[in-house]
Amino acid sequence: MAEAQWGPNDLHVATSAKPYGIMLATRFKSAAAEPLFKRALEVEVKQLKPSDPELIDTRKRLHDVLMQLFKPEEAKQALGNVKLDSGMTAGKGKRAHHGKR
């Protein structure tokens, strides 16, 4: 729905998909969460700087979901250049503001 209203590469697409991915992931529905995090990441990579906290958070969340699905190589790729702190998993870091960028 967000794509139809805002266009396929607008940040609204990512901010619409990501909360659903979070909800599904917290309910241990990693397979359903995976495409939502991938879509959010696809948009954020085009719209945000690599150091943006929101993009880093999405990368970490996708990484965690992929690890739960036993896809370690994809999980490693999802992180890009992001380094995980020891013991850190998605959702434990700081949340970014969803305002205009």
Image (cartoon, rainbow, N blue to C red):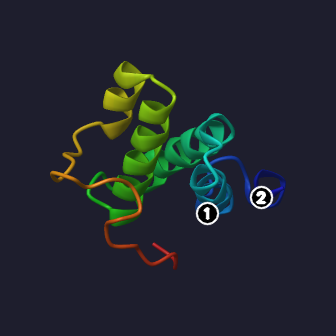
- Of badges 1 and 2, nearer the viewer stands 1
Name the quadrant of the N terminus: bottom right
Q: Which mark is residue 15?
A: 1
Q: Is residue 17 left or right of residue 89?
A: right
Corner quadrant of residue 37: top right
Residue in the picture at 38% in, 30% down? 75
Task: Work out how far the residue at label 1 is from the one at label 2, CA to CA, in angstroms.
Answer: 9 Å
Residue 69: x and y in percent read 51, 28
Q: Where is residue 31? Give x, y as percent.
A: 64, 34
Residue type (three-letter) at the residue carrying disc 2: Ala
Mark toward the start of the polypeptide (1 vs 2):
2
Residue shown at the point (32%, 39%) measured from the top left = 79
* The C terminus - image quarter: bottom left
Estimate the x, y position of residue 22 in percent, counting from the top left: 58, 57
Q: Tag 1's secondary structure?
A: helix
Q: Residues within 10 Å of mark 1 (few under 14, many from 20)?
A: some
At 64% from the left and 53% from the top, the residue drawn is 27
**Vertically, is 41 above or below 6?**
above
Q: Which residue is mark 2?
A: 2
Extreme residue in the front direction:
28
CB atoms of marks 1 and 2 within 8 Å: yes
What label does residue 63 carry, if any? Answer: none
Q: Is residue 96 above or below residue 59?
A: below
- The foreground one among 13 and 64 is 64
Label 1 is placed on what type of residue? Thr
Relative placement, left or right, of 48 versus 31 is left
Residue 20 falls left or right of residue 83: right
